[in-house]
Image: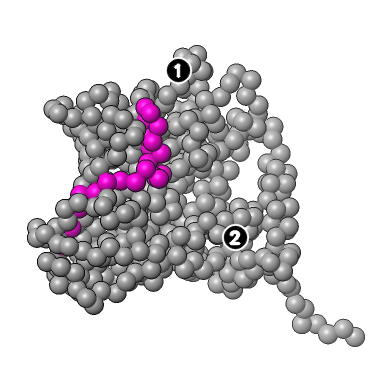
Amino acid sequence: MTADAALVPPDPGVSEALARERAAAISSVRYQLQFLIPPERAERVTGNVTVRFVLRPASQVVLDFEQPRDHVGKVAVNGAAVEPAFINGHIVFPSSALKAGENSIAIEFVSGDEALNRNDDFLYTLFVPARARLAFPCFDQPDLKARYRLQVALHPNLDWEVVSNGEEGLRTFSSNRYFSFVETPPLPTYLFSFAAGKFSIDTAERNGRTFRMFHRETDTAKVARNRETLFDLHAKALAWLEDYTGIKYPWGKFDFVLIPSFQFGGMEHAGAIFYNASSMMLDESATQNQLLSRASTIAHETAHMWFGDLVTMRWFNDVWMKEVMANFMAAKIVNPSFPEVDHELRFLLAYYPGAYTIDRTAGANPIRQPLANLNEAGSLYGNIIYDKAPIIMRQLEQILGERVFRDGLREYLKKFAYSNATWLDLVKILDDRTPENLAAWSRAWVEQRGRPQIVSNHLKT
């Protein structure tokens, strides 16, 4: 079967227009994935994926895969061989190859290394904001959540461990070493992840739950010095968040992976958080700021298990929302453990100068900005996101009161669990709980640039 001549060519990247079209037409997505890790870093990682989904109605389907044409092998749609079109980093399937209802697309591929972060004796994925398409064909947008069933096949020369979002299932040993993981609850592509390599695994029990720490630290004294504290901090954050949200931890098992020279302080992969190892394994001479920073990072990433992972923004114009909520929760969790710190002064110095520096200028931008393409997601970040957003979130809680604010967040998390929501969805829920006009407040503080002006109606005499 060959591609239709009437295919509509998608733009490069992942455009908002494409994402909206797919979200309206596609549902119930499942990925069955296998990656084969070769013994040498210079060799290519290969794999295969079967994507299952419901299509309404039968129409053109676009998968994202930002790799050369020769990185794609056999392709089949609903069991029949197909020659799709390759356009602007996408694999495009004609409507004639598909049907209304359930479909499956099977593809053999060669992964690019850009998002696999390969080292000689370990690798890890990092797919935020839309980099899964560098590793495998997928619908790389946050509002097409999917269930993932992963298998990682290691060359027999690789005596590595593997960790992913899902619970580990079978380990089998034949011509390769296979690690299979049970299917996950619904996740966006940017939160799907796995790491493989020479990792040590430490295990601990807290409050009836098993925690596992994957790490590469060879200093046994440093591991012994930090191990119990790391488990304690995660358990404390988890218990606090379960109580605050009224929702049990949603992801089954709880692993965390300490990665040397990790790009961020942490990344909230559901069920398998990744951290920068150096910020977790602290020296004996660690300062109070380092201890506070570590506790805050752990609380922040654990808060994401609800805020961002359980309920995910529909589009990355609301990425600020998950970040500010995680910071907001982290402060509530951690600050009481550091009573000697003036947290109000620390908040003021951390956020107000940076927010004012930008917000008072003609070049200020609103917190919530339009985003036409995920290729441009990096342009959203800056002082307004990191500094002004925490200020307005604190202001919002003060307007509502702590209990009303918490109850509104509980309703929001339950209503949109394992799904997607926007900032305006949260505003609507909170607005229904107060006589204040939160919609107007949101327009002034979140959707308009600059500092809101107070205009008096009183005439001077």
Residue 46 image-quadrant placement: top left
Tag 2 near tag 1, CB within 8 Å? no
Say which quadrant the C terminus sits in: bottom right
Q: Is residue 183 above or below residue 422?
A: above
Q: Is residue 268 above or below residue 172?
A: below
Q: Nearer the viewer, mark 2 or mark 1?
A: 1
What residue is drawn where x is 21% and y is 55%? Answer: 51
Q: What mark, if any, has residue 396 been given in the picture?
A: 2
Residue 241 falls inside the magenta stretch? no
SS at circle 2 = helix
**Is 48 in front, or is 272?**
48
Q: Tell me if residue 222 can be seen.
A: yes
The amino acid on which the numbered mark 1 sits, given as a three-letter code, is Thr
Residues in magenta, as a range: 103-126
Residue that lies at the very extreme toward the right in this rendered image: 461
**Is 207 in front, or is 211?**
211
Q: Position of residue 367 (x, y in %)?
A: 59, 63
Q: Is residue 192 left or right of residue 56?
A: right
Q: Position of residue 10 (x, y in %)?
A: 34, 69
